[in-house]
Amino acid sequence: MSDIRVRLAPSPTGFLHLGVARTALYNWLTARAAGGSFVLRIEDTDRQRSTDEFLQAILEDMRWLGLQWDEGPEVGGSYGPYLQSERGTNYAGYIERLLASGAAYRCFCSPEELEERRGAHSSTEAAAWKYDRKCESLSTEESIALAREGRSFAVRFRVPGGRTAFDDVVQGRVEFDNSEFDDLVIARSDGTPTYNFAVVVDDIEMRINYVIRGSDHITNTPRQIMLWRALGQEPPEFAHMPLILAQDGLVLSKRRGAVAIGEYRRRGYLPEAIVNYIALLGWAASDGGEILSPDELTTEFELSKISRTASTFDPDKLAWMNVQWVKKLDVADRTDRLLPILREEGLVGDEISGDERAWLERVVNVIDDRLKTLRDILEFDWFFLATDVDYDSIAVNKVLAKPGAGDILAGLHKELSAVSDFTPESLELTIRSFADGMGLSAGKVIQPLRVAVTGGTASPGMFETLSLLGREKVLQRIEKAGEFAD
Ligand code: GLU
């Protein structure tokens, strides 16, 4: 293992959506490619908005995408706990260190006082109001004395003068004038650390040396770099991912327009397709290849090749990619992945016999490329598995209610009862000669038969379909459809 240590630090205040999944993937690929470690840390200190349901969903979606973490919840590791809410005691020592070195100071201004001073400014100035450093000039003795009196205080970081710059792996040189920042609160009056401080302490303790995250964090980075330095540590490398835009050109975010990964799973998308698609949201393979497996991505991926410009989320492209991935699955794999959906719908039992499995694989084979998503099996091909056909009223009116359809179905019923073996070949011979006998084209005979046994006007090849359904079901369905026929 190399010493590259990256981390994903999601807050369980919502489901895993595309943007965070992409950050997760880029972290995972960076660790895999370098033989380093991928840490999952859960930033759940916002107790009001964090829930266990979101946490479990994030873990499940990460696993489903195949982005297994080397350290983190459930798997443990040497630098745990990996839930920020369980790391409470770790922060106090760091706060003491910053107070002792003078890099931080106690601020006794109450929220009401701060509000009053902010309010004294015009509305535009108030929005940009920065802490006026009233408590910065307190001597250490005064500050300690006030704290001993029991006065409530927050701890603020004393932002040094000058500039803070860093070489972002994606964005290039990024520079900020420190005067843009106010002396940020690092510990609230109840002693709890604020976001920027907790992240730095956790990243230090977890030995993180590469921070890969969304560019929405870029203004936090100079603050965090200042904190790293004040704690006597070398800051990590930073790589800020470009934004993802929705098709209307606005930023796709957790709160706006982002579709949750779990939703795609429920819609029958394949994890390979999602991973493949999000990998290309801001990055391209050197040969421009579009269909890449996780292994190929690991070999090809380079963080420094990520584009700085925002990319646009295109659901149609994702749907197309899913089709490519469904096509790539062999029959056994496709069947494995369809089984949970079929079970959920009660179309197959929990345990299936070898014969049932073989039959299901034949069905999957016949369906061939009709599946754009795994759930399409319920849309188009559920009739293979359902006990009763659900007749589409348009198909019934257009085909079964036509004059002559009843005679065709009655004739077919007779022929198919008598056909000796129910193989596609003998069914084809029987049906074609029946059509000849009636002076009709095969298509004219097959159309009402198709509606009778599948409920609709589109299905895989009729002879294979009949053979797979078996004589009993086919005859029952023809009888049932006879009720609609003229
Ligand atoms: N918890 C932060 C978020 O969900 C991530 C912090 C980070 O990556 O540094 O946006």
Image: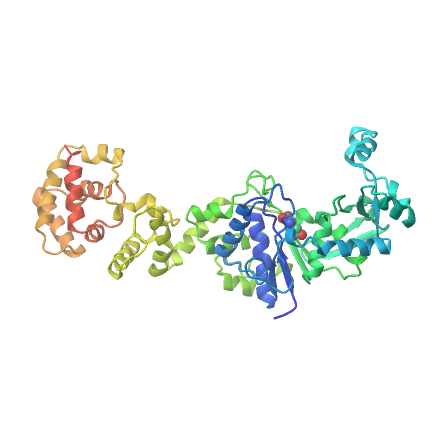
Q: Position of residue 405 (x, y in %)?
A: 15, 36
Horizontally, is 458 left or right of 283 in the view? left
Say if residue 335 shows up in the picture.
Answer: yes
> 130 or 165, which lies in front?
130
Can you name the residue that lies furthest to the bottom here?
Answer: 1
Q: Quadrant of residue 304?
A: bottom right
Measured as percent of width and height from the top left, residue 210 is found at: 67, 60
Question: Which residue is outermost to the front?
Answer: 149
Quadrant of the rendered structure where residue 392 is? top left
Residue at horizontal 82 percent and vertical 40 percent from the top:
131
* Residue 172 seen in the current view: no
Choose top left, top right, bottom left or bottom right for residue 485: top left
Q: Nearer the viewer, residue 250 or 152?
A: 152
Quadrant showing the C terminus: top left
Residue at the image position 76 percent from the left and 43 percent from the top = 189
Rendering coords of residue 239 (x, y %): 67, 56
Q: How many marks?
A: 0
Q: How is the image coloured?
A: rainbow
Answer left or right for 435 relative to 84.
left
Decide which of 268, 61 is in the foreground and name it: 61
